[in-house]
Structures are given as structure tokens and as C-alpha cells.
Amino acid sequence: MKNHHGRLVTVGCLLAALLLVLAARHELPAKAHASPRPAPTDTQTVAVNPQQAKQVRVAEVTQREFYPTVDAVGYVDFDQDHLAQVNSPYAGRVREVFARAGDKVERGQALFALDSPDLAQAEATLVSAAAARAQTGAALERAKGMAQVQANAPRDLEQAVADQQTAEGNYQAARRALRIFDKSDADIDRIAATRRVDGELRIESPIAGRVTARNVAPGDLVQPGSTPSPFSVSDEDSLWLVANVVDADAAQIQLGQSMTASLPALPGKPIDAHVDYVASSSDPSTHRVMLRAVLHTPPAGLRPQMLANFRIQTAEPSHHDALPVDAVVREGTGAMVVFTTTDGLRFTRHPVQVGVLQDGFYPVLAGLPPHERIATEGALFLSNALALQSQ
């Protein structure tokens, strides 16, 4: 009886174990099916705590006027229409210099004087012609007197008249030759009266202005057309703003358009002008088109050959949502993104298409939902936080 009873207990234990195993096999899939799955991570939204939110500044999106513009580089130059390169039309050695660089001169004021062999020859010709004119004039008067008393032949009077007319013609030709040297009638009369040959040629300024360069000294030999010119005189009340625009932008430039110059030498002092000349051809070496504006009464401190950056307005302004430069983050892929928010704690990433930066703001062309508040300062912090969250 005992053995039979023990076998019954053993069989019962085995059946109980088998039932537990079967129950476990049926229960495991049910539990696995019932376990919650992790929610997918939002890769476009980042949440910050109140302490972190202090690093982010939130602002309303505003609208601004944006002007279609073309940017260019260039420089300030002398007004070439009011710039005189003063040279001597004749060769000679410099006798005296009357002006220095930086001097203000008037039109007709002598800049330097030189000993001119050509002038000396012209003066000598005048002196000789004046003497011959006086001599033939006296001979003609004597011939007329003798003809009245029939003391000479008629041909003698005719010869005296011919000689006097020739001498008068030579004298007038000599006077005209001296006028080429800018000698006045008073100067010519003085040379003829004193019979003095000086040969001093004074070179005068053709315009009123300021001496911008002096490249001559006493004793120098000057040749016509020598480079550099002995003197340069410029009208200080007029300068050129010269800009060079790339070929691709040149078609947008028209006469009369507004242009603004910004100079590193005059920070914070933009200069406004209008385009009044556009070159008809492009520079083959730089592939840029030159344009310029005349600047009347230039501001103090502006000097020729200063470098400048130019912005030319090419069309009427347009209205766009404006993003401060701090609000736009350029990602490694080149995408431009902003972060919008409703509560200042959760920020959503939005790729946007923006135009050219103007005065610290980007015009929004596409991608920004309407009526949104955006993160300005701290937008880069949000971008980095979102990148860490996505890892």
C-alpha cells in the first residue's frame, strides 16, 4: 500500500509541474504583448527647463522693408573731370617752383618756371622782327620824302614799301608765335621794347583747386608729356565713388539708382550717392563692370584711394517677415533653421528659406509658420540641445 501511495504522489507532482509549464508557455506571449512600447522621439522639438530657458530670448516676428541690392567693392578717386595733370608743352630746365603739394591754387596761378630754348628763340625772333620793322619803317619815310622832291626813282619807293610790308608781316608772325607760349600783349610789347630775351616759361594752373601731387624740383629737365606730370591739381569739392560690379550683377545696374558707400576708414558713416555712369564693357582681367557716382561736398576725412564697400539698390523695396541674425542657425548641411515656441519651454525646429542679410535681418522667403514667436539669442544653444537629444 505504501509503495502504491508513493507512486501516486510522484505522478501527481509530475502532472502539477507539467501544468505549470504549459500555463507559463501560454502566459508569456500574453505578457509580452501587453508590455508598452517606448514612444517615438520627436526629432524636431526640444524641451528646456526653466533654468535653461533663461539662456534663450523669445521675440515676436516682425515685418520690415527689404531692398533688392547688389554689393560691390571699390574705392574713392579724384573727380577726373576736374583733375588737371599740369605739364609743360615745351622742353626746358626748371628754374623755379612756386607751389607745394597741398597748396590751394587759383586758375592762372603760376606753378613753376623753366628755361625754354623754344621760348628764347621765339623772343629773339620777335626782337629781330621788331628791329627790322622799325628800320624798314624809317626807310619808307625817307623814300616818301625823297619822292616828294623827285630825288629818287619810283622803284626805290616801291622797294621801300615792299620791305616795310615784309617786316610788318614778320613782326606780326613773331607776336603770334609768342602767344602760343601764353604771353600776353603786354608781355610781347615789353619784350619788343626792351629787346630783352629771357626765355622764362611760366606754367600756370588751368583750374582752381588743390595741388595733389608735385613731382618737380629746380634743375629738373622737363619734357612734354613726361610721366608723372610735374603737378596735379584737383577740385577738392568733388570726388568720385568708383565701384566694380561682377558681370552677373551688372545687368541690374541702371543710371540714377541709389548707392551707399561704407568705408573702413570712416566706420559708422555711410555715404549716399546715385549712379551716374556705368561702363559699356567689362574688364577682361577681373570680369567686373565699373560704375561711379559723383560726390559733391565730400565729408571731412574722405580722401582719394580709400577702399570702400558699396550697396546699390536695384528695385523698389518689398515687405517680408524679418529674422534677426541671431535667430537663424546654419546647420552643417547648409540648412538655415529657426526655433518657434508658444510657451518658451518647448521649441520646434523649422527649416526656412531666407534672402540676403540686410542691416542685421534676414527676409523670410519660405518655411516660417505665420504668427509665431521665435528664439533669437540662444537659438544656437537649442540647435545643439536638439542634436544631443537625437543621438
Image (spheres, rainbow, N blue to C red):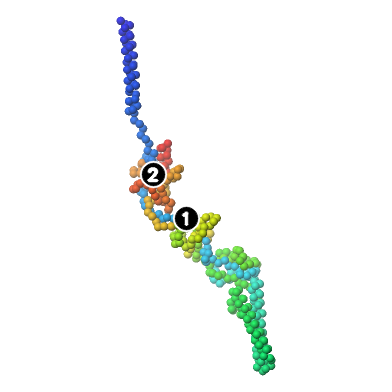
Quadrant assignment, res 139: bottom right
Q: Is residue 78 left or right of residue 162?
A: left
What secondary structure is found at the residue carrying circle 2? strand
Residues at marks 1 and 2, CA–CA distance in whole angstroms = 31 Å
Residue 311 higher or lower than 144, as above or below: above
Residue type pointed to by label 2:
His
Does any portion of residue 117 appear in the rendered image? Answer: yes
Q: Is residue 331 left or right of residue 211?
A: left
What secondary structure is found at the residue carrying circle 1? helix
Q: Is residue 237 left or right of residue 389?
A: right
Crowd tier of the residue under label 1, counting other residues whose Cα lies within 10 Å: few below 14, some 14–19, many 20 or above: some
Would you say the residues marked 1 and 2 are in contact, meaning their CB atoms lie under 8 Å apart? no
* Residue 249 marker: 1
Residue 36 x, y percent position in the rendering: 34, 30
Crowd tier of the residue under label 2, counting other residues whose Cα lies within 10 Å: few below 14, some 14–19, many 20 or above: some
* Residue 166 marker: none
Which residue is nearer to you in this view: 343 or 323?
323
Residue 229 x, y percent position in the rendering: 59, 65
For the C terminus, which image quadrant?
top left
- Judging by the rendered image, the residue that carries numbered circle 2 is 350
Quadrant assignment, res 27: top left
Residue 320 x, y percent position in the rendering: 38, 52
Q: Residue furthest bottom?
A: 149
Residue shown at 60% from the left, 76% from the top: 179
Residue shown at 40% from the left, 46% from the top: 352
Quadrant assignment, res 197: bottom right
Q: Earlier in the sequence, mark 1 or mark 2?
A: 1
Residue shown at 62% from the left, 67% from the top: 224
